Amino acid sequence: MSGELDLERLLGGMRPELNPGRFVFTTVEDALVPPGVTPVVTVAEPEGLTLVALQSEADGAGLRYDYVAGWITLRVHSALAAVGLTAAVSHVLAEAGVSCNVVAGFHHDHLFVPHERAAEAVALLTSLAERHA
């Protein structure tokens, strides 16, 4: 259950997968998730509860946002104590001018990139994985 620690194995086994949909980052001040919104990520901050949710759900709830993202899951089971995976991935994307918001789950890392560049980001990450396989 601990996940992979070796950076070469992590990079070689990433298997980036683009999840279907358009996702947005929004916030609610009262920490209550509006009806009809099922967030894929939540982050509690002093200013409010950040939600990452489908754009259609945010629109339906009247939530404001300004960033529409594609959601990429790195299918390798990375250990939370692993060193270098986020740095390597963000470096490759940064070199191509692709912004990236990273969220670590217990089993996988999740990347939110501009929706219009999501397929390009997957291709860049796939190439990185192939170089380390």
Image: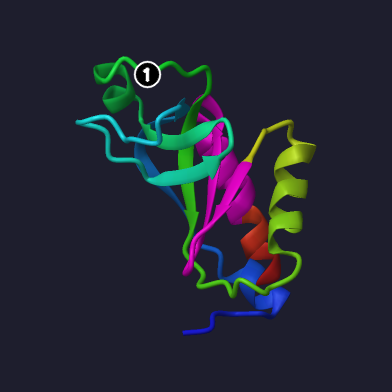
Relative side of 80 to 23, left or right: right
Q: Is residue 110 one of those drawn in magenta?
A: yes
Q: SS for tag 1?
A: loop
Query: Where in the figure is residue 23, as x and y percent of width and height?
Result: 41, 32
Is residue 112 shown above or below 9? above
Task: Report crowding for label 1: few under 14, some 14 to 19, many 20 or more residues within 10 A (C-alpha).
Answer: some
Identify which residue is drawn at 57% across, 72% down: 78
Relative side of 48 to 84, left or right: left
Identify which residue is drawn at 77% across, 48% down: 91
The boundaries of the magenta stretch are: 101-126
Is residue 125 shown above or below 79? above
Query: Where in the figure is residue 114, as x and y percent of width and height?
Result: 55, 29
Identify which residue is drawn at 71% across, 74% down: 7
Q: Is residue 20 one of those drawn in magenta?
A: no
Answer with the quarter of the image where residue 34 lies.
Answer: top left
Is residue 71 shown above or below 14? above
Query: Where in the figure is residue 8, as x and y percent of width and height?
Result: 71, 75
Q: How many marks?
A: 1
The one of 5 and 27 positioned closer to us in this rendering: 27
Q: Please, which colouring scheme is shown?
A: rainbow
Answer with the quarter of the image where residue 82 lies.
Answer: bottom right
Identify which residue is drawn at 54% across, 80% down: 3
The one of 112 and 65 positioned closer to us in this rendering: 65
Residue at the spot of label 1: 63
The one of 8 and 23 positioned closer to us in this rendering: 23
The C terminus: image quadrant:
bottom right
The one of 123 and 84 positioned closer to us in this rendering: 84
